[in-house]
Image (cartoon, helix red, strand yellow):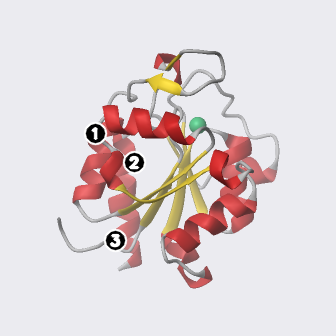
Amino acid sequence: MEMKKKLVVFTDIGDTIIDEGSEKRAVPFGVVDRADCIPGAKETMLRLYEEGFTIVMVADGLVRSFENTMRQNGLSHIFSAKVISEEMGDHKPARVMFSKAFEAAGLTDADKGRVIMVGNNLKRDIVGARRFGIRSVLIRWSPRYSYQPETEEEIPDWQIDKPEELYALCVKLESELE
Ligand SMILES: [Mg+2]
């Protein structure tokens, strides 16, 4: 592992790392038993982790769903902290999801400039990040959501079309922080 980077990456899971179209559940809306990564997502997240970027899960869903899918895809170990809506009793864009992630990762308000939120959902990931005061990256890989902002708050700082692009963006942002 290389020296710890300054940039901290908060990430959504569904249609950001995991392909929601591949999710298998025993019952509708139940725990996700199996799912595959979006092409390139596993490699990208492992590379960011191995190069010393701090990665924090900020996800809406059931704890066991994320345990299952992260384990199956070999990603359980990359997260410094995991903030999951089931445990929080609220979901993004709620401020508590982001404040808990800050607390869990040992971050304070002074660190807001070096944290980005990566996600696919304008109304949850992008609005949540904006209201909390961190920058955001919209990943437009999934066909399941609209990527057309309807309000000022839904405008992301950066947009990417596939996971691999996140690596280059993180390297660029890291160099700006140094
Ligand atoms: Mg999502």
- In the rendered image, which residue does mark 1 sit on? 74
Residue at the image point whose x is 71% and y is 48% from the top: 91
Q: Marks 3/1: CA distance?
A: 28 Å
Q: Residues within 10 Å of mark 2 (few under 14, many from 20)?
A: many
Indicate the position of residue 63 as horizontal and vertical percent values: 54, 42
Indicate the position of residue 108 as horizontal and vertical percent values: 57, 81
For residue 120, the mark is none
Amino acid at circle 1: Gly
Side of 112 relative to 43 (left or right): right
Amino acid at circle 3: Ser
Callout 1 secondary element: loop
The residue lying toward the viewer, choosing from 131 and 140, is 131
The earlier-in-sequence mark between 3 and 1 is: 1
- In the rendered image, which residue does mark 2 sit on? 166
Amino acid at circle 2: Leu
- In the rendered image, which residue does mark 3 sit on? 175
Side of 167 relative to 59 (left or right): left
